[in-house]
Amino acid sequence: MLVNKNLLKPNEFASFLYDEFSFLNSDDRDLHNDIVKSGEILTPLVVTTDYVVISGVRRLTIINQLSTITEVPVLITEYHSTDLNQAIIIRYNIQRRKSLVEIAKEYEALQITYNLKQGADHESNRFKTGKKEQKILIESTNSAKSIEKTITRIISSKKMRMSLYGETHTESWSNVNREFTKGIQANTIYENLKKEKESRENKKRTTQTKLLNTDFIKILNKDSSDLSDDIEDETVDCIPTSPPYALKIVKYVKDKVKKGNSLGEEETIEEFVANRMVVLRECKRIIKKSGSIFINIMDQRKDGRILRLESKIADAFEDEGMVLINRMIWFKNNPTYESNSGFQKSMEYILHFVKNPDDYKWNTDWLDNKITFLGDLTYGEVGKKRKIRDVITYEFPLEEDSSYIAGKLKTNVINNTYLKNLLEKRGYTLSHQALFPLEVPLICVLSTTDPNDLVVDVWGGLSTSGIAAYANNCRYIGIDQSGLYSAMASERLEDFIQTYLPIERNNN
């Protein structure tokens, strides 16, 4: 039947569920042009008995702008406007072309209408009806296999915006939609908000954590370029450390970062070397004449060219008077894949420096034939003193049904599950993924220290070096300019101290 357009009113839920009509939207422009061209509404509006529009609010908006159309075809339902809820509106708009954000709004509206929250009674008729409505909604998109996860991410993004920024439902949906219309993928929007949430939670927890400070282990939150107030000249026995990677390949937390020491974000190799040398000069000051400095460096390519970072660091440190006496290779079986025209980069270097190559501490008696946990790290037949290899590899046990012929795999896989769970229990989210394995600082500590010696890591991170030091009865100072990493390191070391006793080691 036809009714005068002045009798029609939009439903109260339309502005929440669906975007307002806009000529900036191509679908809205096309709909407007089709109605103007035809001079009439071809598809009836679905209305209540008192003429509230259930489906067709966009068409109502357009005809209210046109003086040429006064009467509109309508389909009157059994509902009165007081009966309307969001579920009814969604059901009658199921075939309308909608954006993913609009579908997510509908999906959330059904969750609220039918109380589909976690812990609800799954056997109740209300719950079953709600899940059925959601299934119908998803299937109407013709992409049911992939869209449900996407709209769930969109809803989660909306909720996180409300929590993070104090936005209302309407404001949050509007801002999520704004990012979506810019072409930002739903997963990217979600991950960015998740990182922001984790960062805020980590920052809050950091202020509540007291850094570890005992006579045996100490964590310092500061820049290592000047340690004169903390460590005296030539008092450190071993420095196993891993400077931040170059050329922005890892994103580090940048709280309390001084200008000019931008944690691997230098634009040039010259800046990278210069910034690292500021700290390495301080290492030279604090290391004993008999002490050792181990630097973990990964080389990289830029514009297709090998940069030889380890050589440039080695040359620069030797120019400061230090001597390179060992260069080990840390072999990685499963490095990050590189899609370039070149060999796959599969290793990192460990450079061993001393002040005097004729007089530095070097232990071998801890290496005996009973030691099995080091595997291929050591070499030597029965009856001979075992030696540390200059290529570090890791054993990975094969499953019985493996098709590999080799008896072992060599890999750099680092299992952070325990650390991740520990930090979550203590209110943190692990954001530092550039951890080196325990074996790296372990061989440095075992081969160049005695019990009660002092081990220092000037780029301490999460203090893997501290675990190696404590396990071998050495004192430890870990230094990092990130408050978050320093707090996490304290939590990690405190847990390790409470769980394990140092091993007994006899160095003769």
Image: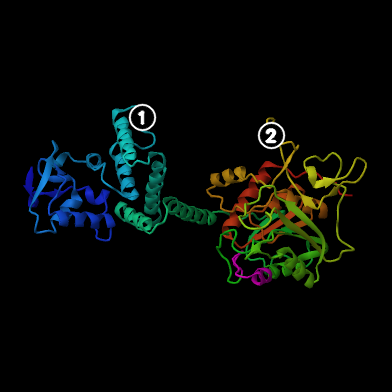
Q: Is residue 253 visible?
A: yes
Q: Is residue 227 visible?
A: no
Q: What range is drawn magenta here?
A: 261-275
Q: Total of numbered circles in the picture?
A: 2
The residue pinned by badge 2 equals 403
Q: Is residue 456 on the magenta stretch? A: no
How packed is label 2: few (under 14 Cα within 10 Å), some, or many (20 or more)? few
Using the image, determine if residue 167 lies above or below residue 398.
Answer: below
Choose between 15 and 303: the one closer to the eye: 303
Residue 278 in the image, given as x and y percentages of width and height:
69, 70
Q: How far apart are the two marked residues, 1 and 2, measured between alpha carbons?
A: 45 Å
Q: Which residue is found at the position 22% from the left and 49% from the top?
A: 14
Q: Is residue 262 on the magenta stretch? A: yes
Residue 481 lies in quadrant: bottom right
The residue pinned by badge 1 equals 122
Please tell me the numbered disc located at residue 340: none
Using the image, determine if residue 404 lies above or below residue 296.
Answer: above
Residue 342 in the image, given as x and y percentages of width and height:
67, 57
For the residue marked with disc 1, what is the amino acid?
A: His
Q: Which residue is found at the position 79% from the left and 69% from the top?
A: 318
How packed is label 1: few (under 14 Cα within 10 Å), some, or many (20 or more)? few
